[in-house]
Image (cartoon, rainbow, N blue to C red):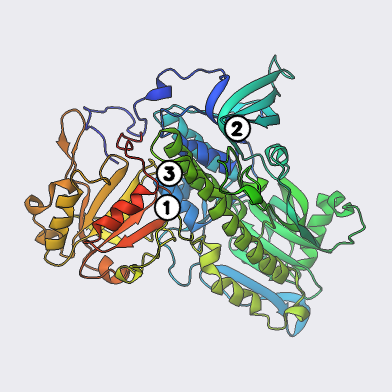
Amino acid sequence: MQFHHHGYVSGDPRVQPAAGVGLDRPDELPDEVDVLIVGAGPAGMIAAAQLSHFPDVVTRIVDRRDGRLAIGQADGIQARSVETFQAFGFAGRIAEEAYRITEMCFWHPDPAEPSRIVRGERPPDDPHGISEFPHLIVNQARVLDYFAEYMANSPSRMAPDYGYEFRGLERSDDHVTVTLVRTAGERAGQEKVVRAKYVLGADGARSGVRSAIGCTMQGNSAFHAWGVMDVLAVTDFPDIRLKCAIQSGAGGSILLIPREGGHLFRMYVDLGEIDPDSHHEVRSTTIEQIIARAQAILQPYMLDVRHVAWHSVYEVGHRLTDRFDDVPVAEIGTRTPRVFIAGDACHTHSAKAGQGMNVSMQDGFNLAWKLGYVLSGRSPESLLATYSAERQVVAQNLIDFDKEWSTLMAKTPEELGDPGRLAEFYVRTTEFLFGFMTQYAPSMVVAEPTHQALATGFPVGKRFKSAPVVRVADANPLHLGHQHRADGRWRVYVFADRGADALTTWATWMVGSPVSGDVVDLKVVYQQRHVDVDVAAVPQVFLPRTGPFELVDYERVFATHPDDDIFELRGVDRAGCVVVVRPDQYVAAVLPLHATDELSAFFAQHLLESSTQPVG
């Protein structure tokens, strides 16, 4: 974290100076906004948090609740999400209060006595070392709290507008008229009409915004039901504080998820197949019946439930919209989208793979920076079409994965055959479970992987996989990717050639190039140890002046870590290269140091010539 460059800061450095709309933000929801976000869940809140760094963009987020979410249904936090939290500055703090998953235990029927369960496989949660970030369990409400804090501390001083329910919208060529109804306070029941340039519907599985733009959910039900409960209980089951997949000989299974705080845990309890003609009778299953089912599956262990914090019953279904915006498939490319949907409004599936909240947040992150760039005049409107194109494919992959995972979870031991089949699938698909399988196709913001061989460990279209480096100025070892902040800027990582001659030529070109400007954050990584890098010889483009006092920013120059050479770890060519990373942490291009024309051409696709002003 950098501060003091505008003068001494004695307070919390996370609170940034107010700017733009944050200088005089009205408490009352205005009649006209740039972006109206409907729904203060994970997708909506991360979008608002990202847009809060664009202080010249008027963004408001509304929710029908009368205040913050007290308890959420989602709780699984993938490593990819923790990586995202790092960009928003709260990964460390949320990890301290969360439950950390390090192993997963698989329980099967005892071959000698099938009515009893015994422990089988016990693989580590990340057997392949996919991420340096942990896999966490923490209530969705706390995730939203952290995003709300980030928004409040941002230049725009954003905060959710609670107590507004979406009722309808009308779209024109240059704006959207949204009708809301107050749900709380003295004016409950009154209508409020807001005119917005763009609307994001993050209003859940029963999305009114989705219906208003003519999108429908397509898919089917697996005709299998699960009861889920968050409980405090006394038990002699030995792995009660470990994530477990439990299959009983009598039929039925449990997915056990320990919760934060050391005592609470969640159980997804198999309620079995359901009759398609039963008119959802299973939803009337009582908590007592769910507990009794869990007790039967856990035999010979006892389960004495003392308190139920929350419970529900759901039927497994897999549904997806064919688009994530208001442009019909037949009209794609003919007009600009104005209304978007994200999260559960686009895709629904089982909760057992822990993907819902995580994928929803990446929806919001993907769209928000693009809206910010378009509305601040940095990018053309055509950029917005990449949102649906990119995220619809990700959602389809999620649906396909969840069908396989939830089907395996529901199988009886006889149907599975090999008792280790579930554990094998879990280990084999860890990269997907951790949120790292997403790879965006070439577009105006993802280059063709023509030069991928120059940095094989940074696949174009996938998220930038961090690695250890040493900061030259202060000899601090740190992770390169952890310096990426959710401030709306592109990152250009320049990996120096051995003698740094090509680097010097590149840096000379960069000064005054079309790629320069405050929307691009430059960093250089040298092949030498930090003690062998002469700061005086570092090109000035990597030592920029900052603030009213024109102080030198020394935190953009790095060297290899003595134990983990990033060039070796990520397959970076010793001749050097340039790795371009999008504001949402995905690799956009890998280029040779001499390919300055290609670099200019890539940015020219989506950055307008006037895009040199600071983001926020």
Query: Which of the image's four quarters has the N terminus?
Result: top left
Q: Amino acid at mark 3?
A: Phe
Q: Earlier in the sequence, mark 2 or mark 1?
A: 2
Image height check: is 290 above or below 459?
Answer: above
Residue 606 coordinates in the image, percent (x, y): 40, 46
Q: Note whether 387 is above or below 439 in the view shown.
A: above
Residue drawn at (78%, 52%), measured in percent from left and top? 313
Q: Is residue 550 left or right of residue 102?
A: left
Q: Which residue lies at the image location 74% right of the left edge and 55% below the top edge?
A: 218
Q: CB of mark 2 within 8 Å of CB of mark 3?
A: no
Q: Provide residue 559's location: percent of width, then percent of height.
A: 19, 60
Q: Give the secondary structure at mark 3.
A: loop
Which label is found at residue 68? 2
Residue 343 visible: yes
> In this rendering, which labeled residue sits more in front, label 3 or label 1?
1
Q: Position of residue 19 (x, y in %)?
A: 37, 25
Tag 3 residue: 90
Which disc number belongs to residue 445? 1
Please state, as top left, top right, bottom left or bottom right, where the C terminus lies in the image.
top left
- Can you tell which quarter of the image residue 527 is in? bottom left
Q: Check contact, mark 3 vs mark 1: CB within 8 A.
A: no
Q: Earlier in the sequence, mark 2 or mark 3?
A: 2
Mark 3 to mark 1 CA distance (whole Å): 27 Å
